[in-house]
Every structure is written in structure tokens, then in C-alpha cells.
Image (tube, grey):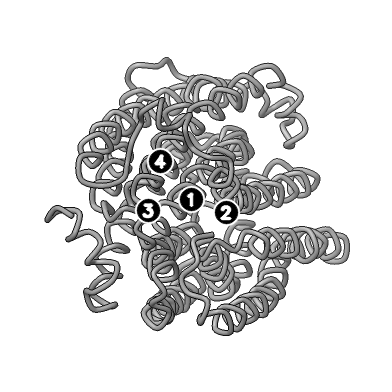
Amino acid sequence: MNRTAYTKEQLFREVPVTRALFSLAVPTIISQMINLIYNMVDAFFIGRTGNAYMMAATSLTLTLVMMNVALSNLFGIGGGSLVARLMGAGKRETARKVSAFSFYGAAAIALFYSLLTGLFLDPVLRFLGASDATLGFARTYTLIVIVIGALPAILSATLAHLLRNTGYARQAGIGLSLGGILNVALDPLFMFVLMPKGQEVAGAAIATALSNLVSLLYLLRAYHRAGAETPLSWSPAEARSLDSQQIVNLFAVGVPSAVLTGLFDVANICVNILAAGHSDLVLAAMGIVMKVERVPNAVNIGICQGMLPMVAYNYASGNHDRMQKTMNQARKWGFLISFLSMAMFEFFAGPMCRVFLSTSAGDGETALKTISYAILFLRIRCLASPVQFMNYQTSYSLQAMGDGRDTLLHAFVRELVFYIPFMFLLNALFGETGLAAALPVGESCGAAFALILLMRFLRKTSMERKDGPETR
């Protein structure tokens, strides 16, 4: 084993847990935050127009953008988790085949998603809650960012997952961050300089699509270079030679991970439909809140994604004590972030919501009413932050250990048994306030169920430890 590859695997198996997790999680958190900024910057600059209908349109298209994340998880987390476990088991040649299969699988699913969205664009947007006032804006944004731009978005996210799970968290973070920083620069240029007034949504969409393309180009180069030292490949021959059992192992984690994000997307669709049923202003306010509350979520997801390869590697290698220490350390960090953010949102809800919608441009009265809704919703929904982290960490831990069945079960129960039914129930009983309250109620129930699943799986793993390492 050469020195560079050894250094990467040493990080997983020998470096003190706190230092190793810090090395993996911090670049991931930074990239998550910058990625979040470039997703939020469209809303920020659109908010400078004071047009609540533009804001509502970009809010409902968030559902389609999040589907990019779900599809990238299919091969990124499914393939990345399997690659890390195969490395832990010493099966590097098989890991190369898995990475190559993941690369081409992500490209194929991205092209299919683009085609499908383009064929059914207007019906999909109407289903998501687009009104006559918001349909044109939503159509423009979706056409550019999804129909044209899904391939670079999905493939770059998949490559970042694969790089991260072989120890290249810094390169993955740089690639995603590069696109985010570029989008911050390009948004005002396209929205307010190059595009005519009234076409700000088109300008934001073009800036996002170009930023994703630049990110992809960097990550392709990083992936190619990392392939000389780690089991990363884009060889078509290696992709075709992957045996059926390893494909099953990939999808055993990838499908639940994609479904988890997809169900989160379904929940957002329900939120949008119910919010739009009250008014476009309630929809716009909920869209603002969903962007603000993503800040602690992005940090916590970064912690979990940094944790995943260490858990996967040590699970497969049989070092379950180190695996448990990694999970415990990640849990401490996540709870700290969650409670700090919850306090911050309660005290500073007003200023944070006003960042996303100007009250001095456009229709000031509708903007003020939208902001008042957003402040109320944020103060209610932020109470979910700690239990949301519990859901994230449990899901990523199960995926890292190859437990796709429980990951899938958790996803379905969390969204379809708890959150979405509470959403409709509380909305019917208490209106838009109840709609906001459904998040902390549903996530609390989901977290309790998640802990039961995790404890059950860990007990089973402990009992089977005498049988040796697993590479599911």
C-alpha cells in the first residue's frame, strides 16, 4: 500500500477519533454551508426586488432542486458507503468497480430526471402549488436549473460523496464550495446587469446552472487525480464488470438514502400545497423559513457526512469500539449546534427573515405581511432542530453500517406516519400556525422511532461480532 493511500486509511482507523472526525467533518461542513449559501443567494437577490410572487415561485421549485439531492444520494451515499466498507475489508478492486458504476449510474439518472421534468413541466409545477401569478417564474427557473442543469448538479454531488468516503473530504469541499462562491458572484451580475428588469428569476437560474457546471469540472479533475491513490474509477469496463451482489449492496443503502430525501421532498410538497391554500404570501413566508432553518441543518448534515466513512470503515474492519466513539462524538457536536441555533432563531427571527425580502422595494405592504408570517413560522419550526439532528445521525449511521432496511423503514415512518399526517391534522385544527408546528411534533416522534431502530441494530451487531467483519 503506498504512502498516500495509507495516510487516508490511517485517518479512518488510527488517528484519534476527535481529530479524525474534525478532519473529515470540517471541510464537509464548510462545503455544506457554502453550498447552502449559493442555494439561498438566489432567494436573497430575488428578495431585493420586493416581489413576493417571485419569492413564492422559487420556494415551490425548491422541491425539484431537492430531488437533485435525492438522486445524487442514490449513487453517492449508496456507492460511497459501500466503497468505504470494502476498503475496511481490504477489497480495493471491488471498491473501484463500485465507484465506476456509481459514476455512470449518477449520470444516467440525471439525464432521465431532466427529460422527465421537461416533458411534464407545467403539470408538475401546478401540482406543487404554482398559481397563475407564480407559474411563469417557476417555469423559467425549473427549465434552466433542472431540465438543462440537472446533470452537473447531480453528478458533482455524487463525486463529492465518493471523494469524501475515500478520505478526500477537503477536495470534495473545495469542489462544492467553488460552485457556491461563484454563484454568489454571478447572481447579481446576471439578475441586475445582464438580464432586463422583470427577468431576475431567469438571471438567478442561469447563474446557478453555470456555477454547478464549474463545480463539476473541478470535481472531475479531483476524482481523476484521486483515482491514482484510492479505489476511485470512471472506467466503463470496471463499471460493467461489477457483480450483481455488489449492485444489490449499493442499492441496499442508496435506495433508502434517496427515498429518505425524496420523502423529505414529498413533505415539502405538502407544506407548499397547504401553505398555498392559505395564500401566496403564506407560501412565500414558509419558503423564507425553510431557507433560514437550513443553516443548522447544513452544519449537522456536514457532521453526519464526515462521520459516515469512519463508521463504515470501522464497522467493516470489526473495530466497533472506534465506530461507537465516532458516533458519540458526532452526537455531541450536533446537539451543541442544534441548541445554539434554536436560541438564535428565537431571539433574532425578525432580522433573519428580513434578509430574504425587502420591505422598501416593490409592494411594501405584502412584503411586511409575508415577513410577519415568516417570523412566526421560524420561531415555531426551530424547536425541531435537536430532534432533526437525531434523525439525521441515526439515518447516516444505519447507512454507514449497510442497514438499508431500517434506513428505509425510518424514512417511511418519519415522513408518512408522523410528519405529513401531523401536517394535515394541525393545519386543519390551527391553520398556518398548526402547519408550522407539525415539524417539531413530527420530528420528535420520528427521532424516538429512529433511536429504537439504532439500538436494536447495534445490539444485533454486538451479538454477531464473534462472526467477524461484515461487508454488507
Picture residue at 23% right of the left edge, 42% below the top:
226
Q: CA distance from mark 1 to mark 2?
A: 7 Å
- Give how far apart the Cα atoms at labels 1 and 4 are: 11 Å
Where is residue 429, by image quadrant?
bottom right
Q: Are marks 1 and 3 in contact (CB under 8 Å)?
A: no
In the rendered view, tell whether residue 17 sits above or below residue 279.
below
Q: Which residue is mark 4?
A: 99
Whether residue 369 is visible to the viewer of this picture, yes or no, is no
Of residues 290 and 310, the one nearer the viewer is 310
| Residue at which label 3 appears | 91
Q: Secondary structure at mark 2?
A: helix
Residue under label 2, please give it.
Answer: 253
Query: Dot 4, crowdedness within 10 Å: few (<14), some or many (≥20)?
Result: many
Task: Using the numbered discs, state the Cα–Cα distance from disc 2 to disc 4 in whole angstroms.
Answer: 14 Å
Task: Name the residue furthest front.
Answer: 467
Please determine whether, in this image, residue 71 is positioned above or below residue 466. Answer: above
The structure residue drawn at horizontal position 29% and vertical position 77%, both measured from the top left corner, is: 17
